[in-house]
Image (cartoon, rainbow, N blue to C red):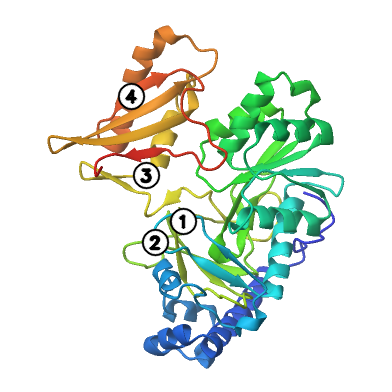
Amino acid sequence: MPSHHRFLPGPDLSRDQLFDQQLSGLQWTVNHAYEGSPVYRAKLDAAGVGPDSITSLDDLSRLPFTSVEDLRDGYPLPLLSVPEDQVVRIHASSGTTGKRKVLAYTQKDIDDWKDMFARCYELAGLTTEDRVQICVGYGLWTAGAGFQLGCERFGAMALPLGPGNLEMQLQILVDVGATCLCSTASMALLMAEEVEKHGLMDRVKLKRCIFGAETHSAAMRANFEERLGLEGSFDITGLTELYGPGAGLECEAHEGIHYWADYYILEILDPETLQPVAEGEVGEMVVTTLRKEAAPLIRYRTRDLTRLIPGQCPCGQVLPRHDKILGRSDDMIIYRGVNIYPGQIAAVLEQFPEAGSEYQITLRRSGGKDSMQVKVERKLGQNADNDENLAKTIGAALHKALMARAGVEIVEPGELPRSFAKSKRVLDERDE
């Protein structure tokens, strides 16, 4: 990690100072939301919590939850806690169901987001000499704007390509000499395959990749790191409701994601009971913002699943860590009465070096009975003669891990669809 701390807190920040910042931020947020938003005022009144009743961080558990339904109900400017003339921008989530989740930003919100994102570039070890190829979506979606704002604030050179247009991606990669790729893991893999296909490896100067927006396996990551000749890759987190991408990043130790606890409080709760889980247990991320003006979040249920990582990171950074996003509580597949997350299937596949990183799950229903088929790409260079045996062995391992049977088919490397965005891992054809 760079010794100079331009955007990250220095080593002199103590846990007590961090807790003090969180408490004053929480008090400010509750007061700001109560004064500025009729929706929040009604919620807080119903919970019997006034702006003056927050005296310690323990009072967080008395606050009411906010959910995606609150965002949809308040469309088009939900949870707005400032006068509309203070809103300088909106972004919306890429969600496809119902009304989009639209979030408003004041100028201070944008400035805070820039600083949060600049931390990501700093933690990933970039310098102002780096050239950052940004291959994520621009427009209403927060990704492109976030990566670019943060890059410019940090002082590196932004190459704002967006997703798609592989020919131009490769041209800029080679001619401008991009040193950092920002994309989904799926896009990084696609780029790696294209660089290899066009024989450009010796002309590519990439050293790092910052990727996020979808769950990924260690095998997929190792695949694109090796093929692009990277020194390292870094998992980034974020969601539209919480400014956008840039809410946290892995450091060089790769032992979890540092999140900006001076900008938001993270709770890990049981998605059913909404009570805290034991430290280190998996649960749903619930976030409360500490500085957000236009659309503050009070105990917002993200539906993302992760766990807190106890102790201090070997890198020395005082900011706490959570594990990578392990899936979403609403991504769960219910198959023959068993609750399954796609990430559990990826974890089994990782145990097989003959298997590639790409897989696809298809669920079907016939005669009232459900079936699951898992297609897995064979690893490049592996012999097809072993396919039948490999499929059987993977099938047995899945049955043991999931307590449910799945058919397994081994397919050619590159056969499953590639994506500029998030790969579609689950095709549920049961209700079609």
- Disc ID at residue 341: 3
Q: In the picture shown, does residue 160 fall above or below 68?
A: above
Q: CA distance from mark 4 to mark 3?
A: 17 Å
Mark 4: few, some, or many residues within 10 Å (few <14, many ≥20)? many
- In the foreground, 303 or 89: 89
Q: Is residue 124 visible?
A: yes
Horizontal side of 358 relative to 47 (left or right) equals right
Q: Nearer the viewer, mark 3 or mark 2?
A: 2
Could you tell whether 258 is left or right of 94 in the image?
right
User: How far is mark 3 from mark 2, CA to CA?
Assistant: 23 Å
Under mark 3, the amino acid is Tyr
Q: Name the front one of labels 1 and 4.
A: 1
The mark found on residue 98 in the picture is 2
> Mark 2 or mark 4, which has the lower sequence index?
2
Say which amino acid is labelled 4: Val
Outermost residue to the left? 367
Q: CA distance from mark 1 to mark 2?
A: 8 Å
Residue 159 picture location, percent across and down: 77, 45
**Viewport quadrant of the C terminus:** top left
Mark 1 or mark 4, earlier in chain? 1
